[in-house]
Image (tube, helix red, strand yellow):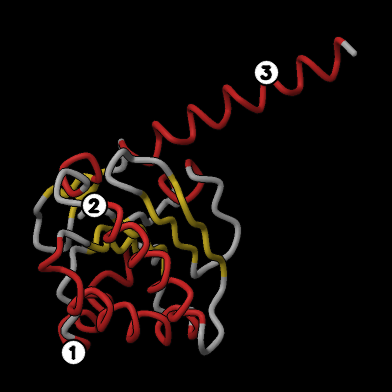
Amino acid sequence: MVKRIIKLISAAIFSISALTAQTNIKGETLNGDIVSVSELIKNGPVLINFWALWCQPCKAEMKHLKNIYEKYADKGFTILGVNQDSPKSLSKVNAYLSSSMIGYPVITDPNNEIFNSVNGQVMPYSLLLNKDGEVVYKHTGYLPGDEDKIEAEILKLLKESE
């Protein structure tokens, strides 16, 4: 019984620290700008999306995320892309972002520090945070149609904000 209580307390503490880690996420874009979740979240819900160039499902998902972002950005929703490529690939990342015309901010995490801090295992990996910084939806991987699930969760949050 005592072991079970200790496990429950540990899980609660871990959940609280993981939440804090998500709202404290910040990093540098390829243009040198500093972007933080704590600032973005002031405007509304934030989808944190971890991706890499070598990850084909990531790139497929990003096409849809771009459209979702463009559709709801004027309502306070934003996306923070977190790129996981190595430092030697950053020039390719910049070229990809330019050619894809991704309008939302993308920070780099070449040593996976941010990815590990949110217990990421597989990419693409997304966390949807409400305006209070609480994770209300997690999504791992990408299959066609997943974007509809993500958009539905975003719409729920935007309706709650009205």
Residue 99: which numbered mark, if any?
1
Amino acid type for the residue under numbered disc 1? Ser
Q: Earlier in the sequence, mark 2 or mark 3?
A: 3
Give the left or right position of residue 158, taking residue 11 as reference. Answer: left
Indicate the secondary structure of the residue bearing disc 1: helix
Indicate the secondary structure of the residue bearing disc 2: helix
x%, y% of residue 39?
15, 42
Of the two numbered discs 2 and 3 in the rendering, the one whose residue sits closer to the viewer: 2
State the separation of the CA atoms marked 1 and 2.
33 Å
x%, y% of residue 110?
37, 56
- Between 107 and 21, the residue placed more toward the observer is 21
Give the left or right position of residue 155, taking residue 36 as reference. Answer: right
Q: Earlier in the sequence, mark 3 or mark 1?
A: 3
Check disc 1: other Cα within 10 Å, few if <14, some if 14-19, many if 20+. Answer: few
x%, y% of residue 126?
45, 62
Residue 1: which numbered mark, if any?
none
Q: Which residue is mark 2?
A: 161
Q: Which residue is mark 3?
A: 9
Give above or below for 153 relative to 98.
Answer: above
Amino acid type for the residue under numbered disc 2? Ser
